[in-house]
Amino acid sequence: MRPEVRFHIRGDTRGSDLAIGPGKVALLEAIRDMGSITSAAKALGMSYRRAWLLVDETNRCLVAPAVATASGGARGGGSALTTTGSELVRRYRALERETEAAVKRKLQPILRTS
């Protein structure tokens, strides 16, 4: 059996404070799936404050916010990914798949088999 090649992509944008990687993308996906930053933070085992800071940093660094929030009301507000947030997640996951395939092509042939 050959060892499996796994990796994570993290990108830092030049001239911006945005760093995007598996943690932020997982947070965005959790917000999309759960409808709130609080629920997403709990699901990922992080504090609400940490999650909010990550969302705020991401929102400030994009051409449009990735997450839209609503406060108060009978349901207590909530959060949702914007079109920009959905596109960021889609592009990151596509880049991850493409890069994984390239890495496997390059490294798998030289890995020792068990």
Image (spheres, rainbow, N blue to C red):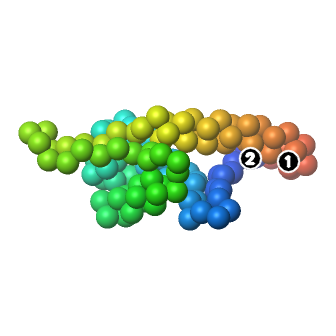
| Residue nearest the viewer, comparing 88 with 2 | 88
Q: Which residue is mark 1?
A: 107
x then y, percent, for residue 61: 52, 56
11 on left or right of 110? left
Tell me: residue 21, above or below residue 66.
below
Q: Position of residue 66 (x, y in %)?
A: 45, 45
Is residue 48 something one can see in this rendering?
yes
Quarter occupied by the N terminus = top right
The reply to whether the C-beta atoms of the residues labelled 1 and 2 are less than 8 Å apart is yes
- Determine which residue is flagged by label 2: 5
- Determine the secondary structure under disc 2: loop
- Say which element carries label 1: helix
Q: Is residue 80 above or below residue 14?
A: above
Residue type marked 2: Val
Q: Disc 1 versus disc 2: distance between alpha carbons?
A: 8 Å
Going from N to C along the chain, the mark reached first, 1 or 2, is 2
Residue at position x 53%, y 48% in the image: 63
Q: Is residue 46 visible?
A: no
In the shown orientation, is residue 18 left or right of residue 59? right
Write the residue at 41% across / 55% down: 55
Location of residue 27 in the rendering, given as x and y in whole percent from the top left corner: 43, 49
92 vs 60, left or right, is right
Q: Quadrant of residue 102?
A: top right
Mark 1 Cα-neighbour bin, 10 Å: few <14, some 14–19, many ≥20: few
Position above or below: 12 against 108:
below
Residue at screen point 30% across, 59% down: 48
| Of 5 and 74, the residue lying toward us | 74
Give amino acid for label 1. Answer: Leu
Q: Residue furthest right?
A: 110
Furthest-left residue in this view:
74
Circle count: 2
The answer to whether residue 30 is left or right of residue 71 is right
